[in-house]
Image (tube, rainbow, N blue to C red):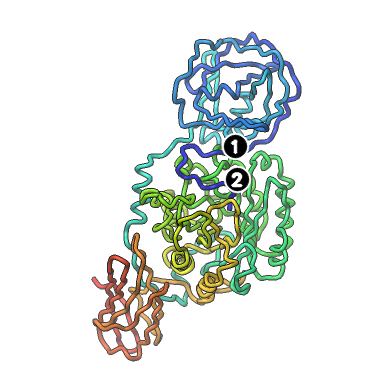
């Protein structure tokens, strides 16, 4: 989980991506007789030279739609959506101008949050155009922009510089799309498929044919024999080379896969740190366990995503090395909800570089502690009444369907709120218990391609809401109940007893038929679920997953009507089925 808050509504999110450094050396800015004019996004810009290298002023970028974030140790120019006001260019010389002195910048210079070597002179900062517009891979050529989001060419004696502007999407259209996802009631009757053939299998690295790995970052509250994945964080920019204690000891002692969440703050390190990357992967290989490497997560809501080409280049580099290890897989893992200017599409590395797709999916009662946020805001952020794992996963699976991407999916880290760090938030006990039910029971039903759920059992002191389970034994008991039911993989090599499958249009030969009701009524709380046979009440439940296991030996021969009635806080919905017994066989069919 990132320490950066998820600011989805911000028009331009901050960024923290980096490239390798190129030594500037001390030099003197020299007058150039070259008369090439610089045209920056269609507007003239003053140019300079340092020993024949053309440079531009970082501070000048503010006039061209960039936000200048200037602090004591760093200056960062982050591109806006466009040039809001055409700058006054009357004082710009077509001759590449002279500055008297230049030396390597004491401040870190970043362009779109990518570190770049630069100069300072007379209180201003400069970067070289060739470094700013350099290509690194074919991916950049396809995009048409460098890692810094720039591209340049010479034309009629001018240097033409074009800028890739990360644009704000159509907010209204995006809201309409999300509102459609969460505003329609959903109901389905499920059963247990002992053949385990009802779930898709894509043949991805480390993908289980069936069953869901359940994981946590460390295990000091859950039953250890219920966990098939150990979630561990590795900090790239700290050059952390191994799993830290106490997780290290847990991994050694248990049969589990390793989910290695490799957090990246500074992408410049990636391009120059192949030796570190290999050393870290070698250390992970020494555990002799399957390893899923999650590379640079949550780029779509953090500074990591300000320069998409750089992100993809870094991801591809690490992925290519990870794939040299036979029992390793690669996970691409954005946040479940995107910032307005950072759609999933900007950061997709390509099919060959990704084995799993994960999301960070945290069920929050309020967005950033705002208890007054109206319905429109809760729809957009999928908070409050819309905070269900089964809702947030729709966003990533919609992206996958639109682009024909077929991969196993994961909740790479997630949870439900266990403590509010702000006043007037209301009760969370029943609210969170319901969300846990949707996360651990309903998500595997609704999304059969879901193969991994990692719970984020850790406090982040700066966050508005906590998700850890240390003081919530009743929440832990609910999760353990789901993990022990049969559909989860409780060790690395475990086989689930069954997978969930839709109950209708199936014939059953067994004498007991387990039935589960998945129900989602928008902005309602489900009060109870009733099972009725030919109008008579068979069973009633008030607890997710509303499981009922009728025995068929007392069912009369012939055709019957099975009704599942779902009572919400403001509506009642029903599902109707035909139930036919013929000898020892029972068939459940959707009623036409």
Of residue 473 and residue 522, the one placed in the foreground of this image is: 473
Pointer 1 residue: 137
Q: Where does the image place residue 119, in percent across and percent down from the top left?
A: 68, 24
Of residue 81 and residue 205, the one placed in the foreground of this image is: 81
- In this rendering, the answer to whether 61 lies above or below 579 is above
Q: Secondary structure at mark 1?
A: loop
Q: Which mark is residue 280?
A: none
- In this rendering, the answer to whether 292 lies above or below 195 is above
Of pointers 2 and 1, the one earlier in the residue sequence:
1
Q: Secondary structure at mark 2?
A: helix
Question: Is the C-beta separation of discs 2 and 1 under 8 Å?
Answer: yes
Q: Residues within 10 Å of mark 1 (few under 14, many from 20)?
A: some
Name which quarter of the figure residue 108 lies in: top right
Of residue 123 and residue 259, the one placed in the foreground of this image is: 123
Viewed as shown, does residue 318 lie left or right of 141? Answer: right
Residue in the image at 71% along x and 16% along y:
101
Pointer 2 residue: 316
Q: Where does the image place residue 406, in percent across and percent down from the top left?
A: 47, 56
Is any part of residue 278 visible from this angle?
yes
Residue in the image at 71% along x and 47% along y:
238
Q: Residues within 10 Å of mark 2 (few under 14, many from 20)?
A: many
In this view, which residue lies farthest toward the front? 423
């Amino acid at each position: 989980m990132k320490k950066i808050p998820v600011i989805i509504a911000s028009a331009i999110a901050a960024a923290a991506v980096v490239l390798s450094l190129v030594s500037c050396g001390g030099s003197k800015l020299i007058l150039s007789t070259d008369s090439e004019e610089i045209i920056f996004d269609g507007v003239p810009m003053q140019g300079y030279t340092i020993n024949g290298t053309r440079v531009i002023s970082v501070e000048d970028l503010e006039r061209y739609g960039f936000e200048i974030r200037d602090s004591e140790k760093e200056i960062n120019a982050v591109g806006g959506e466009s040039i809001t006001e055409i700058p006054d260019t009357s004082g710009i010389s077509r001759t590449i101008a002279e500055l008297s002195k230049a030396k390597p910048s004491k401040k870190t210079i970043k362009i779109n949050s990518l570190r770049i070597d630069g100069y300072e002179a007379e209180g201003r900062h400069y970067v070289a155009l060739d470094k700013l517009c350099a290509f690194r891979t074919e991916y950049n050529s396809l995009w048409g922009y460098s890692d810094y989001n720039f591209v340049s060419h010479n034309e009629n004696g001018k240097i033409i510089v074009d800028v890739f502007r990360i644009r704000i999407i159509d907010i209204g259209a995006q809201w309409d799309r999300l509102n459609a996802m969460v505003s329609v009631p959903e109901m389905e009757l499920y059963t247990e498929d002992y053949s385990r053939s009802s779930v898709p299998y894509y043949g991805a690295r480390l993908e289980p044919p069936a069953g869901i790995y359940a994981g946590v970052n460390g295990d000091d509250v859950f039953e250890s024999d219920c966990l098939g994945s150990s979630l561990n964080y590795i900090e790239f920019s700290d050059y952390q080379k191994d799993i830290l204690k106490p997780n290290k000891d847990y991994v050694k002692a248990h049969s589990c896969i390793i989910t290695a969440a490799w957090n990246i703050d500074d992408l410049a390190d990636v391009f120059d740190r192949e030796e570190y990357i290999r050393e870290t992967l070698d250390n992970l290989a020494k555990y002799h366990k399957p390893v899923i490497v999650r590379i640079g997560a949550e780029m779509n809501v953090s500074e990591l995503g300000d320069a998409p080409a750089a992100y993809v280049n870094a991801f591809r580099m690490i992925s290519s090395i990870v794939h040299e290890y036979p029992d390793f897989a690669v996970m691409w893992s954005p946040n479940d909800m995107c910032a307005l200017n950072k759609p999933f599409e900007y950061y997709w590395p390509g099919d060959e570089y990704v084995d799993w797709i994960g999301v960070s999916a945290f069920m929050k009662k309020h967005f950033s502690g705002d208890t007054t946020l109206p319905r429109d805001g809760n729809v957009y952020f999928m908070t409050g009444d819309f905070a269900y794992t089964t809702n947030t996963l729709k966003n990533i699976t919609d992206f996958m369907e639109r682009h024909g991407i077929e991969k196993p999916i994961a909740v790479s880290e997630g949870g439900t709120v266990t403590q509010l760090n702000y006043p007037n938030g209301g009760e969370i006990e029943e609210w969170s218990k319901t969300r846990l039910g949707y996360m651990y029971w309903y998500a595997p039903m609704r999304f059969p391609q879901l193969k991994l759920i990692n719970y984020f059992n850790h406090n982040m002191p700066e966050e508005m809401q906590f998700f850890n389970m240390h003081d919530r034994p009743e929440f832990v008991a609910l999760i353990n109940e789901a993990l022990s039911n049969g559909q989860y993989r409780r060790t690395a090599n475990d086989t689930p007893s069954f997978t969930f499958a839709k109950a209708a249009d199936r014939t059953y030969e067994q004498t007991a038929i387990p039935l589960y009701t998945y129900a989602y009524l928008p902005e309602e709380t489900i009060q109870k679920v009733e099972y009725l046979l030919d109008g008579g009440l068979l069973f009633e439940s008030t607890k997710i997953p509303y499981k009922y296991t009728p025995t068929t030996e007392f069912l009369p021969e012939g055709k019957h009507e099975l009704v599942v009635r779902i009572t919400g806080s403001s509506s009642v919905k029903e599902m109707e089925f035909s139930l036919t017994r013929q000898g020892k066989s029972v068939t459940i069919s959707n009623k036409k």
